[in-house]
Amino acid sequence: MPIASPESTDLERRVLAHEQILQALIAYMARTEPRFIDHLRARFVEPMSMARHEHDHREADDYAEEFIRAVMLLGATSR
């Protein structure tokens, strides 16, 4: 397994920090506007449940679905 460079490790930490901030922000927005999470679910989660990928790699929509599911979990645990 190759050793990650300090720059890539820093980038990974920054991306993860941004993901956590966005998830918290979206969960907060969903508490004030419950239809917001329905819109995100309709846009990112439901279409992905119908799509099946033949490749081993992940598409951007796969990451988006994972992100929205994490937001939905955040919202469920904060209630």
Image (cartoon, rainbow, N blue to C red):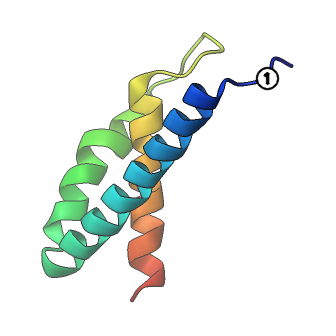
Q: Is residue 22 above or below residue 58?
A: below
Residue type at mark 1 is Ile
Residue 25 found in image quarter: bottom left
Furthest residue to the right? 1
Quadrant housing the C terminus: bottom left
Residue 72 found in image quarter: bottom left
Q: Which residue is mark 1?
A: 3
At 86% from the left edge and 19% from the top edge, which residue is drawn? 1
At 39% from the left edge and 39% from the top edge, which residue is drawn? 64
The percent coordinates of residue 11 (x first, y second) are 50, 34
Q: Is residue 41 left or right of residue 12?
A: left
Q: Nearer the viewer, residue 26 or 19?
A: 19
Residue 44 found in image quarter: top left
Q: Is residue 40 above or below residue 27?
A: above
At 38% from the left edge and 44% from the top edge, which residue is drawn? 45
Furthest residue to the bottom? 79
The percent coordinates of residue 28 (x first, y second) are 25, 75
Q: Nearer the viewer, residue 68 or 12?
A: 12
Q: Is residue 44 above or below residue 33?
A: above
The percent coordinates of residue 62 (x first, y second) are 47, 32
The percent coordinates of residue 24 (x first, y second) are 35, 68
Helix, strand or loop under label 1: loop
Furthest residue to the top? 55
Specify few, some or many for label 1: CA neighbours under 10 Å numbering under 14, 14-19, or 20 or more. few
At 42% from the left edge and 34% from the top edge, which residue is drawn? 48
How many marks are shown on the rendered structure? 1
